[in-house]
C-alpha cells in the first residue's frame, strides 16, 4: 500500500512538471538573453551557489570540471526546478510560477580518483514571459501582448583528471544552442478585425571551452578556480509579421536578418572550501562575467555591465558511521548569495539580487544515491531604484544515482 | 527509501501549495518592455481629394439579360430587339402574332401600393428592324416597316399577344423580298411604367418570346388546311434609348447602374502610413443619395468593388481582388482589410479602386452616392484601424 502511495505521489509530481512549465514571468528575464543560471545542482544551490572548490562525490561539476575527479562511481543526475515569483512595482503586484526539468548530467570515472569524464545538458538562460496591455479604440476592445519563450541550452563534454596528488584539473567543451521566440500581438475581441502578430525567432549557437583547477594544499582546505572563455555566439533572426482572422492568415512580411556574431563574455571564478573536523564544510565563491566585453559584430555593446556574484555556504556533512541514524546520514546546508546582474533596468540602473538558501542531502541505497533538495529565497531588484522588485522562492531537486561501471583500480 | 518519504512529502506539499497559485502578471510590465509609443493602436479616416473620382458611363450590350424591358422609368426609355430563326419562306401567312410572357413590372413610385390601382396605358410600336443588332446604334423607327401598334396595360399580368401586319410579315419571310431579316424592334413611347418580359436566357420554350404564324396549306387532294408554326426567338435584348446626358445626373454625385452602367475609379493616398503597419480593419463606406437613385435602391448589394491591379483604361478587363458590400440603411460598407494591407506593405501598387454594379446588363437600375464634393459626413470614407510596428529585438 505504501508503495502505491509513493507511485501516486510521484505521478502527481511528474504531472505537475509536465503541465506547469509555463511562464516564469520574471520581468528581468525579458532583458538581453533572459535570466541566466550558472549551475543547476541542488547541493551547490543549497550552499549559496558555491561549487568552485567543492570536491564532492555526488556533484557532477560541469562548470569547474576539476571537481569531477572526486566522483567514485558512474553517476547520472537529473535536476528539477520549481519557482514562484512575487513581483511588485510601486503600485501593483503580480505572481507567477514555473516548473521544469533543469538539466541532466552523467559522469563516468575512467580511472577512479584520476580520470573522470562527464556529459551534461542544462539550461544556460531562460526566456519565458507573457505580458498584456488592454485598451479600447472606438468602442472596440483589444489586448496587446508580448510573449516570449525559449532559452539557451548548454551541452558540455568534460573531463577531470588528477596528475598529481591533491591537484586536479578539468576541461570541458560547451556547445550552446537555443531558440528564442518573441511574439508581439494585438488581439481584438470583435471578429470584424484582423489580429496582429509579429514574431521574431532567434536561433543561436556557439562553442566555448572551460577549464578549472582544484588544489588541496592541506587536507581540509580546497582552493578552486575556473575559467570559461569568451566565445562567438552566432545568432540568426527570422521575422514573420502577419495578420490573422479566424483561420485566415496573411503574411505581411517574412524575412531573415543577416546572421550576426555575438562575442559572449568570458566567465571566471575563484572559490575555497574548508572542512572542519570532518563534520562541516564551509565554502565561498566569487564569479564574474565580463559583460563590458560583450560585442555585437565586433562592436562593443552599450547598456551592459559586468556581472559579479558572491556566495557563501556551509553544510553539515553526513555521518560515515554505518550504524548512524538516517537523519545523521543526511546533509544539511545553508547559504547566502549576492549578485549584481549584467542587465540594466529601463532607467539604466543596476539590478542586484540577494538571498538565502537551505538544503538537504538525502542518501538512498546506502551511499550510492542521493537526493538533494535546495530552497532558495531571493530578492531581485530594489523598488527604491528599480521599477520592479521580485521576491523569488525556488525549489530545486537533484536526484543523483550511482553505479559502478568499468572502473580500473589504480594498481600500486 | 522509507526515510526519504517525509522529505518527499514536504517537497510535494510545497510544490502543490505554491505551484497551484494562479499566475497574475505584474501590471505595467508590458509597457516596461515595449514602451508606450511602440506598437501603438491607431485609426484614421481617409477621404478622397475633392473631385478626384473618375467615372465612365456605358450602355450595356444586354443580349444576355434574363429580362426584357419595355417602357419608361423616369428618364430611362427601353426598347426590345428580337431576332428569330427558322422563318419559313415558302408559305403564305394568313396572320401572325408576337407573344411575350410577362415577368413583372416596375415604375417610379411603385413602392406606393396605390400606384397600380390606376390602370395606365402605353402604346407599343413594333417595326421590322432596319439594321443589324448593334448596341451603339439601335434600330430607328421606320413606319414603312411598322408591324403593329398595340396598347399595353399597366395591370396586365398574363402574356401579351401583339398582332402583326401579315402582309409585311410575308415580305419579311420571303427571301426574295428586299426587306432584310434583321429582326423585330419594339419601342414604347410616353409610358409611365416598364413591363418586364422573360427572355431567351430563361431557356423555357413556354415563356421565351415567339411568333405564332398562321397559314393555309393545300393537301394532295386539294383540300385547304389551316395550320400554324411557332418561331422562337434566336437572340433578344433590351436596349436603352438614353445616354448619360438624357438623365440629368447631378455631377456632384457618382453612380453605379445597370442598363446604363457607370464605372468609377477613385484613389486614396496611403503614403503617410508606414509600410510595416499592420492593418487590423479597413472598410470603405459609401453613402447613398436616395433621391438620385432609381428603382427604390433595388440591387444595392449588387455593387462590387475591385482593387485595380493596373492603371484603368475603360474597356479593359478588370483584374484584382473584388469585394461585395454589406448594406446598412443608406450605407454600403466594403470590408477591404486584406487589400489595404497589400497596398500598405507594397505587395501591390496603389492604382485605386473601381466600383460598379454586378451584372450590368441584367436590367436597369441606378444607385447614386455622395462624392468627394459632398461634406465630410456624406462623402466616401475609408476607415482604417492599424497597429504600428514595434522594434523587433530582444
Image (cartoon, rainbow, N blue to C red):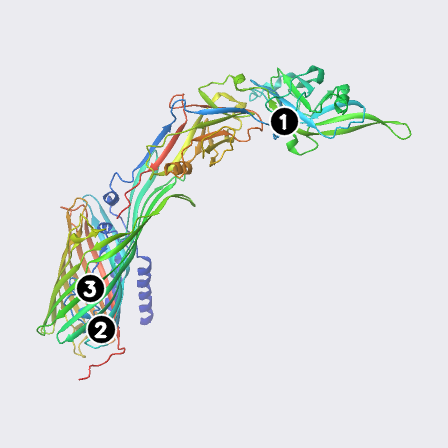
Circle 1: element type: strand
Location of mark 2 (residue): A116
Mark 2 → mark 1, Cα distance in angstroms: 97 Å
Badges 3 and 1: C-beta atoms under 8 Å apart?
Answer: no
In this rendering, would B81 be left or right of B10? right
* Image disc number at residue A210: 3
Residue that lies at the very extreme toward the right in this rendered image: B221
Residue B249 versus residue A245 in the image, above or below: above
Return the disc, 3 or 2, that comes first in the chain's sequence.
Answer: 2
Q: Chain of mark 3?
A: A
* Image disc number at residue B237: 1
Residue displayed at 33% across by 66% down: A8
> In which image quadrant can residue B35 be found?
top left
Q: Chain of mark 1?
A: B
Q: Quadrant of the N terminus of chain B?
A: bottom left
Residue B206 versus residue A338 in the image, above or below: above
Residue B106 in view in this figure: yes
Q: Position of residue A358 (x, y in %)?
A: 17, 63
Nearer the observer: mark 3 or 1; the answer is 3
Q: Few, some or many C-alpha atoms within 10 Å of disc 3 (few <14, some 14-19, many ≥20)?
A: many
In this rendering, would B295 be left or right of B145? left
Residue A78 in view in this figure: no
Residue A127 versus residue B28 in the image, above or below: below
Q: Using the rendered image, report if marks 3 and 1 lie on a common chain.
A: no
> In which image quadrant can residue A196 be found?
top left
Circle 3: element type: strand
Badges 3 and 2: C-beta atoms under 8 Å apart?
Answer: no
Q: Using the rendered image, report if marks 2 and 1 lie on a common chain.
A: no
Of the pair B14 and B131, the residue shown nearer to us: B131
Q: Position of residue A163 (x, y in %)?
A: 16, 75
Amino acid at each position: 500500500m505504501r508503495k502505491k502511495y509513493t507511485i501516486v505521489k510521484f505521478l502527481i509530481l511528474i504531472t505537475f512538471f509536465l503541465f506547469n512549465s509555463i511562464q516564469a514571468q520574471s520581468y528581468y528575464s525579458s532583458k538581453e538573453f533572459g535570466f541566466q543560471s550558472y549551475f543547476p545542482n541542488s547541493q551547490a544551490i543549497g550552499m549559496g551557489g558555491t561549487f568552485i572548490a567543492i570536491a564532492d562525490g555526488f556533484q557532477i561539476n560541469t562548470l569547474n570540471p576539476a571537481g569531477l575527479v572526486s566522483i567514485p562511481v558512474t553517476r547520472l543526475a537529473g535536476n528539477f526546478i520549481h519557482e514562484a515569483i512575487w513581483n511588485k512595482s510601486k503600485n501593483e503586484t503580480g505572481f507567477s510560477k514555473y516548473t521544469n526539468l533543469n538539466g541532466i548530467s552523467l559522469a563516468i570515472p575512467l580511472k577512479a580518483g584520476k580520470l573522470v569524464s562527464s556529459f551534461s545538458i542544462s539550461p544556460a538562460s531562460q526566456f519565458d514571459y507573457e505580458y498584456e496591455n488592454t485598451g479600447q479604440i472606438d468602442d472596440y476592445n483589444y489586448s496587446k501582448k508580448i510573449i516570449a519563450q525559449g532559452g539557451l541550452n548548454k551541452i558540455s563534454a568534460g573531463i577531470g583528471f588528477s596528475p598529481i596528488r591533491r591537484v586536479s584539473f578539468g576541461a570541458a567543451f560547451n556547445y550552446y544552442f537555443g531558440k528564442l521566440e518573441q511574439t508581439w500581438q494585438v488581439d481584438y475581441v470583435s471578429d470584424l478585425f484582423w489580429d496582429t502578430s509579429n514574431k521574431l525567432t532567434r536561433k543561436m549557437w556557439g562553442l566555448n571551452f572551460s577549464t578549472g583547477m582544484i588544489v588541496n594544499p592541506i587536507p581540509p582546505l580546497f582552493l578552486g578556480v575556473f575559467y570559461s572563455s569568451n566565445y562567438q555566439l552566432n545568432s540568426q533572426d527570422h521575422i514573420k509579421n502577419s495578420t490573422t482572422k479566424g483561420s485566415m492568415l496573411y503574411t505581411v512580411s517574412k524575412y531573415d536578418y543577416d546572421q550576426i556574431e555575438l562575442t559572449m563574455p568570458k566567465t571566471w571564478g575563484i572559490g575555497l572550501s574548508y572542512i572542519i573536523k570532518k563534520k562541516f564544510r564551509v565554502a565561498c565563491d566569487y564569479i564574474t562575467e565580463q559583460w563590458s566585453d560583450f560585442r555585437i559584430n565586433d562592436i562593443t555593446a552599450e547598456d551592459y555591465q559586468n556581472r559579479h556574484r558572491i556566495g557563501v555556504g556551509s553544510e553539515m556533512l553526513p555521518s560515515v558511521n554505518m550504524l548512524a541514524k538516517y537523519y545523521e546520514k543526511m546533509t544539511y546546508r545553508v547559504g547566502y548569495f549576492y549578485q549584481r546582474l549584467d542587465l540594466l533596468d529601463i532607467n539604466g540602473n543596476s539590478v542586484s539580487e540577494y538571498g538565502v538558501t537551505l538544503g538537504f542531502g538525502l542518501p538512498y541505497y546506502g551511499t550510492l544515491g542521493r537526493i538533494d533538495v535546495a530552497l532558495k529565497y531571493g530578492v531581485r531588484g530594489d523598488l527604491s531604484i528599480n521599477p520592479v522588485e521580485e521576491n523569488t522562492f525556488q525549489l530545486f531537486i537533484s536526484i543523483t544515482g550511482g553505479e559502478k561501471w568499468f572502473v580500473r583500480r589504480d594498481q600500486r | 527509501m522509507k526515510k526519504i518519504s517525509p522529505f518527499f512529502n514536504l517537497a510535494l506539499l510545497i510544490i502543490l501549495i505554491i505551484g497551484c497559485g494562479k499566475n497574475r502578471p505584474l501590471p505595467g510590465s508590458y509597457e516596461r518592455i515595449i514602451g508606450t509609443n511602440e506598437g501603438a493602436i491607431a485609426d484614421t479616416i481617409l477621404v478622397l481629394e475633392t473631385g478626384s473620382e473618375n467615372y465612365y458611363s456605358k450602355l450595356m450590350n444586354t443580349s444576355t439579360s434574363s429580362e426584357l424591358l419595355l417602357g419608361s422609368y423616369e428618364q430611362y426609355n427601353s426598347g426590345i430587339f428580337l431576332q428569330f430563326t427558322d422563318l419559313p419562306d415558302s408559305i403564305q401567312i394568313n396572320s401572325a402574332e408576337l407573344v411575350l410572357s410577362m415577368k413583372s413590372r416596375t415604375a417610379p413610385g411603385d413602392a406606393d401600393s396605390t400606384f397600380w390601382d390606376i390602370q395606365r396605358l402605353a402604346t407599343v410600336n413594333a417595326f421590322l428592324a432596319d439594321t443589324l443588332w448593334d448596341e451603339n446604334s439601335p434600330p430607328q423607327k421606320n413606319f414603312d416597316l411598322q408591324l403593329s401598334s398595340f396598347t399595353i396595360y399597366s395591370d396586365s399580368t398574363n402574356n401579351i399577344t401583339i398582332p402583326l401586319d401579315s402582309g409585311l410579315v410575308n415580305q419579311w419571310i420571303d427571301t426574295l423580298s428586299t426587306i432584310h431579316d434583321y429582326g423585330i424592334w419594339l419601342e414604347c413611347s410616353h409610358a409611365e411604367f416598364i413591363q418586364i418580359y422573360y427572355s431567351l436566357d430563361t431557356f423555357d420554350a413556354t415563356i421565351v418570346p415567339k411568333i405564332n404564324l398562321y397559314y393555309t396549306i393545300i393537301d394532295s387532294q386539294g383540300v385547304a388546311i389551316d395550320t400554324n408554326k411557332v418561331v422562337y426567338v434566336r437572340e433578344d435584348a433590351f436596349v436603352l434609348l438614353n445616354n448619360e446626358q438624357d438623365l440629368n445626373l447631378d455631377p456632384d454625385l457618382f453612380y453605379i447602374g445597370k442598363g446604363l452602367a457607370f464605372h468609377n475609379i477613385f484613389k486614396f493616398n496611403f503614403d503617410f502610413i508606414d509600410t510595416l503597419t499592420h492593418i487590423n480593419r479597413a472598410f470603405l463606406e459609401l453613402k447613398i443619395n436616395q433621391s438620385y437613385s432609381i428603382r427604390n435602391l433595388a440591387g444595392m448589394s449588387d455593387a462590387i468593388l475591385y482593387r485595380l491591379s493596373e492603371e484603368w483604361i475603360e474597356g479593359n478587363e478588370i483584374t484584382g481582388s473584388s469585394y461585395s458590400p454589406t448594406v446598412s440603411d443608406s450605407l454600403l460598407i466594403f470590408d477591404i482589410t486584406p487589400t489595404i494591407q497589400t497596398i500598405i506593405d507594397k505587395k501591390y501598387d496603389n492604382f485605386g479602386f473601381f466600383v460598379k454594379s454586378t451584372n450590368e446588363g441584367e436590367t436597369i437600375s441606378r444607385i447614386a452616392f455622395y462624392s468627394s464634393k459632398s461634406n465630410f459626413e456624406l462623402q466616401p470614407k475609408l476607415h482604417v484601424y492599424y497597429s504600428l510596428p514595434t522594434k523587433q529585438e530582444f
